[in-house]
Image: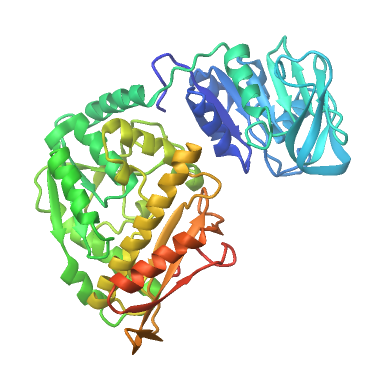
Amino acid sequence: MLQPKNNQLVLVLDFGAQYGQLIARRVRDLHVYSEIVPCDTPASELAAMAPSAIILSGGPASVYASDAPTVDVGVFDLGVPVLGFCYGQQIMAALLGGKVGHVDKGEYGPATLVRDGASMLLADTPAEQTVWMSHRDAVVRVPEGFQVTAHTETCPVAAMECPRRRLYATQFHPEVRHTAYGNKMLQTFLFGICGLEPTWSMEGVVDALVSSIRAQVGERRVILALSGGVDSSVVAALVHRAVGNQLTCVFVNHGMLRKGEPELVEQVFRQQFDVPLVHVHAEERYASILAGVTDPEEKRRRIGTEFWKVFFEEAAKLDGVELLAQGTIYPDIIESGVRKTGGKASTIKSHHNLIPFPDGVQFDLIEPLDHFFKDEVRELGLVLGLPEAMVYRQPFPGPGLAIRIIGEVTPRKLAILKEADAIVREELDAYNARLFEQTGERNSEHSCWQYFAVLPDIRSVGVMGDERTYARPIVVRAVESTDAMTADWAKLPYEVLGAISSRIVSEVAGVNRVAYDVTPKPPATIEWE
């Protein structure tokens, strides 16, 4: 747990909510530290964590189902404010003597909320406002001591509270953007009701992490597999700030990174940060193991297996390495169901994160980012001085360009794709920058979240310079997304697509056609392989 010095901590009890992570993020966005814990955590354990407030998430179950998740009723007697959303309101009511039932008609999506008298939680919000509902069950009778503070046309108890016990709840979801005044309600809860202060900042976090890493490492040596991606780069900068040359980074260059990326890694970590860096040029080794391979899963398997072979060959050359630093982030921990205590080392075994460790190899693990969301990791990177080009790097698959080349990977195909992909990124980087200037948001409504080129295993006929050509096409893929679970194709202006097409055909030898992929996910995936 990375609790700040002022000991302000908001715990989010997770009942399997679709928006569980979002609640924690909204609290952190208001500069108060929050963590997600399982809903069945005993009240005594929660008390030991000394929370300043507790939020009960929503969830997909019915409170009366035989396998419905529940919460230790002692949570409501810890003496700290508790706020429940949706299922969180229903379980609060059910455990404290109220009643939950089926309403005549479920509410899914926007609804008009009407306030009923005075309310501490809804203070300074309009008498009527739009909120986001997602439920079939609802509270039909509040517990003793509670008052109904809002309703909708369908839901008679859209919000309730018991100020004496500092218990508050809503049937709607304040954490989603569709609830017009949801952020105001969270501010009121955190700062008005709980009396917290917005003091959690990334600058303070860096100082705390550096101290924690120093204490954990001591005089030992650390190794890190550096890919040039956001997570591993931030870990490298952070651990190096903490322990200096006790860290060695191993950068395995398999030859399938994008144009300019190996040079960027060298420039940032050798020249800017002066990190001990082992740059392993394994391009020929990978070209050999991929020769003749066309199946995408086999390509992934060979690349992943070979990566760790190369990494541990280099690790064996270093004396006294006992720790492995890794860029595991908070969603990885949550989704895996693993509960961890921040700042503690754990011994990794051959199955950890699917890493094929050799027999007899054992490291203690440093995961300094295991309590941070992706955009928070990016913020940490900026505070640490990493360049924006690295911090805001797009999601990039471990096998690299190998799975954006359909069919066999050859040096010639790699050369074509690297040049075409560089043009796509240059043009869409510029397009995104223009949108950022207009909106101030890095992932605004019409900006691209991920964009790249794909090289299919076909040729097509063209005419260039009055001569017939029989060359390769390039497919451009650009999507809008926030989490990669779903994605829509980016509605790029024709002039942007035209510039990309014109440049690729003119500047990349061996290409005579450019196509644009307009398929959402689902039914397609973002990557082609």
Image quadrant in which the N terminus is located: top left
Instruction: Say whether residue 72 is left or right of residue 387.
Output: right
Q: Residue furthest bottom?
A: 468
Task: State the residue at coordinates (22%, 70%).
Answer: 286
Q: Position of residue 57 (x, y in %)?
A: 64, 34
Task: State the residue at coordinates (85%, 33%).
Answer: 155
Instruction: Say whether residue 527 is left or right of residue 277.
Output: right
Across the whole image, how many numbered discs are drawn on residues? Answer: 0
Q: Position of residue 311 (x, y in %)?
A: 20, 56
Q: Residue furthest front?
A: 466
Image quadrant in which the C terminus is located: bottom left
Asked if residue 143 shows in the view, the reply is: no
Task: State the residue at coordinates (13%, 42%).
Answer: 271
Write down the quadrant of residue 436 in the picture: top left
Task: State the residue at coordinates (38%, 69%).
Answer: 502
Q: Position of residue 42 (x, y in %)?
A: 58, 27
Q: Position of residue 217 (x, y in %)?
A: 21, 32
In depth, the one of 313 and 97 nearer the eye is 313
